[in-house]
Amino acid sequence: MPTSSEEPRLLTDDSPLPLDLDERVGEQLTFIAEADRLKTVLRASPLAAVDRRENDAEHSWHLALMVMLLAEYADEPIDVGHAMQLVVVHDLVEIYAGDSPVFDAAAVVGQREREEAAAERLFPLLPEDQAARVRALWDEFEEGRTPEARFCKAMDRLEPMLLNWLNQGGTWQMPGATESTVRAREAGVVAGSTSLGAVTGRLVEEGLRRGWIRPDGG
């Protein structure tokens, strides 16, 4: 898994774009090509349809679909188009920083620093105006300072919980996952949508009853 410290070559270094391209479109295509790496970043969450783990690109697409379909449950009115931009951008830094599974205490150590370093390397590949725009979207999501960001972060919590339900446990079976840590993820849904938070609560309650989630101290 590439990290920001390894400074991997750009994908266009091995297949350079034609030299006579307009500089702006060349920078945009270089960034878009580099974003292909997102398809290789595996998350801990298992897919429901096949026996393999989800990758970051699939996760981001799923969140965009969820934002489009579930926006009516946001606690505050949101701009759906803007929210979809947030979820498309939110995990791009993991191209270099890698995924940090929430239930793996060791994996989350230094996560913010790794992601900041990745942002500093990745976003400047774009033309300056777009680099600033994409960086602002990423910062907005991370800080959760707008209604759109709060709802998107709620979807970022709900999607893996739904996958865990469909897998009869999924990452709820990881060593660091217990009722309290799962409930903390549930709280992230409630923060953006009380109604979807209630749905998530039902999944957690039933997951506990079925033995898919370990009670604290169990």
Image (cartoon, rainbow, N blue to C red):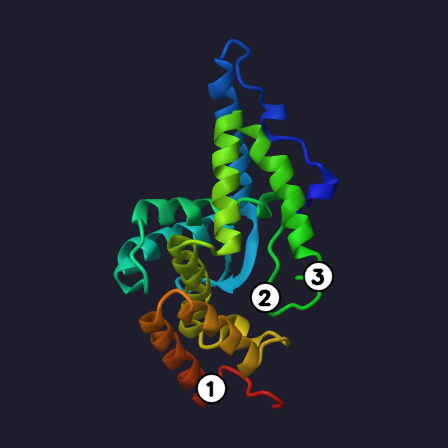
Task: Please determine whether, in this image, residue 162 is positioned above or below residue 42.
Answer: below
Mark 1 Cα shell of 10 Å, populated few (<14), some (14-19), many (≥20): some
Amino acid type, residue under disc 3 in the picture: Val
> Which residue is identified by label 3?
109
Q: Quadrant of the C terminus?
A: bottom right
Amino acid type, residue under disc 2 in the picture: Val
Q: Position of residue 124 (x, y in %)?
A: 59, 31
Q: CA distance from mark 2 to mark 1?
A: 19 Å
Q: Are marks 3 and 2 in contact (CB under 8 Å)?
A: no
Query: What SS does tag 1 mark?
Result: helix
> Which residue is identified by label 1?
208
Q: Are marks 3 and 1 in contact (CB under 8 Å)?
A: no
**In this rendering, would 125 be left or right of 105?**
left
Q: Residue at x 43, y 80 (%)?
A: 204
Q: Nearer the viewer, residue 71 or 165?
A: 71
Q: CA distance from mark 3 to mark 2?
A: 10 Å
Is any part of residue 163 visible from this angle? no
Q: Position of residue 8 (x, y in %)?
A: 68, 36
**In this rendering, would 213 be left or right of 72?**
right
Disc on res. 102? 2
Mark 2 Cα shell of 10 Å, populated few (<14), some (14-19), many (≥20): some
Quadrant assignment, res 107 = bottom right
